[in-house]
Structures are given as structure tokens and as C-alpha cells.
Amino acid sequence: MALVSVAEMLKDADREGYAVGAFNTNNMEIAQAIVEAAEAERSPVIMQASQGAIAYAGLEYITSMALLAASKATVPVALNLDHGTSFAQVVQCIRSGFSAVMYDGSKLSLEENIAMTRKVLEIARPVGVSVEAELGKIGGTEDDITVSEKDALFTDPDEAAVFVRETGIDCLAIAIGTAHGQYKGEPKLDFERLKKIRALTQIPIVLHGSSGVPDEAVQEAIRLGIRKVNIDTNIREAFVWAMRRELEKNPNEIDPRKILGPARSDTVETIREKMRVFGSSGRIK
Ligand code: G3H
Ligand code: 13P
Ligand code: ZN
């Protein structure tokens, strides 16, 4: 199967009311785990590469792994650029074979974000590559957000309406209380804000920083219009904890396959559990 765009994938999710998991990859084992989990769950899946992943593995390796995985897969696979901030890199990813890109102009003013996102859409849409954009500041778990800061950092529903109308993006990443990385306490999601954003935009909404968000909260967010759920930290945990366990069991092991193999298996299990929570399991016959 060829890679499918995220927009194409989210059409069914939107119709049926579930979300597709977007899992970050950095190496061969994680890429394989993502597709193995999708096959086992009969679920569509989005593989994505961050700035860090591209710097680490190289764009060609990431694209080749995803294209190979998709060509062998019997479920739909998308390859998305995660938090792209440079127009040049967006062009490189599209040329390399990505089926979707995220342009993250959340640090720009609304006007600049609209202008840059439009520029990305202008080159992506004619070649069937879908575009996700971000409004509001998602931040990291190290950033303590006070109640007064909330309005400044979280996505403003009226701005979201303007942004979607002015750009015509395929899906929108929003800030409603999640953060990238490991949480110190339990994240509190602003469901009212999500409800308003979805009502005013009517497009699939994307939840970033979803690792560590309780399953019930993720499911409530999906009920309110989240259609793509980004997971990276939980994959890192599954992978590295398994490696650590194997090394502790056998400190003299020098065969990388004996350490990375179990790490890959544990990652498959983590991703399968997520797919069941998101409701994407069993959607592909
Ligand atoms: O969006 C957040 C991802 O976890 C990116 O992290 O650039 O270290 O791969 P990374
Ligand atoms: P987590 O690492 O918190 O799961 O966030 C992933 C993400 O949002 C990637 O864009
Ligand atoms: Zn993110």
C-alpha cells in the first residue's frame, strides 16, 4: 500500500468518531513497532518524525523506512512531519515522500502564522500532502502554567475559527492543557475550550503531548472532536525501560538484538493499548 495522507485517514475517523494515533519514530525498531501494532490491531496509523528524529536518523532513512513499512502493510500508514518550523524543511519532506506535514507557526503572530501556513498549503495540496497547523502554545511539562497565563497560552476559539477559515488547513493542533514530555501531576484538560473550538472550526482537532494523559480524559477529548492523538514520551518509556530491564538481567550482553528486540516488543504492546483507547482498533477489515 502507498502512504496515505493524514487528511484522508481522518475522514473515516471523523465520520465514525474515533482518533488515529500519531506515533513518533527515531529508529528502525520503533518504526517497525508502529506498523506491527497497527497490523495486529487492524488500525490505521500515523508515523511521524520530529526535528530531533530527522537530525538523528536523517530524512532519507526515515522516509525509506516508512515507505517500506507502508508498502508491506495491509493497513493504511501515513508519514507526517511533526512540528515543522522551516518552510525549506517542509519542501524537503514533501519531496522525500512524506504524505503529511505539520507546520508549527504557534510562536508567530496570528497574521504571520496564517501567512506561513497558507504558503505551506499552496505547495502541499497540489501534490496530495495534507497539512496540520498549530494555534496556541503547547509547551513542555516543565512550564508551570498559572490560571492567568492560561488564556494567553491556550488556543482561543475565535482565533481558531479565523485561522481555519483563512488557511483551509486539514487539521488543527490546539493547546488545552497538555504538554510535551512526562507530567509532574495529572494534566487537566479544558474540555469546554475544545468543545467551542470544534464547534467553530468543524475540522479534525489534534491533541499533542498525549502521553501521560489519563485514558478517560483522552476518550472524552475524542468524544469532543479530537481525531489525531500524538504520542512520543510513552514510546520512549516503553523502549528504554525494556532496554534497561534486559541490561540489568544480563549486564554482560553485547548483542544489540537481545536488547533492542525486547524493547521493540514492549513498544508494540504500548502502541496497541493506545490504539484500543483511541478506538482505532478493528477499523480496517
Ligand atoms: O513534539 C515533541 C516530540 O516529542 C519531539 O521531540 O525533537 O526530541 O524528537 P524530539
Ligand atoms: P508526548 O511526548 O508528550 O507524547 O507528545 C508527543 C507530541 O505531541 C508529538 O508532537
Ligand atoms: Zn507535539
Image (cartoon, rainbow, N blue to C red):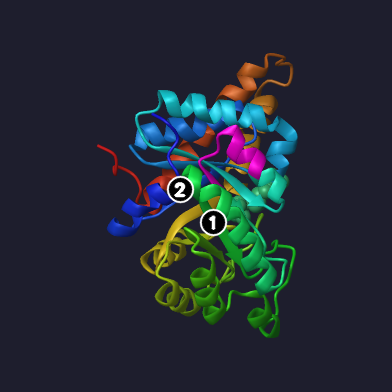
Q: Secondary structure at mark 2?
A: helix
Residue carrying label 1? 132
Q: Is residue 28 left or right of residue 253?
A: left
Judge by depth and name the residue closer to the eye, 151 or 143: 151
Q: Residue at x 62, y 57 (%)?
A: 119
| The stretch drawn in magenta includes residue 222 | no
Q: Position of residue 281 (x, y in %)?
A: 33, 44
Q: Position of residue 140 (x, y in %)?
A: 70, 61
Give the amino acid at mark 1.
Answer: Glu
Q: Which residues are magenta?
A: 91-101
Q: Residue at x 53, y 71 (%)?
A: 166
Q: CA distance from mark 1 to mark 2?
A: 9 Å
User: Which label's residue is closer to the chain start, 1 or 2?
Assistant: 2
Q: Which mark is residue 6?
A: 2
Q: Pointer 1: residues within 10 angstroms few (<14), some, or many (20+)?
A: many
Q: Residue at x 65, y 43 (%)?
A: 91
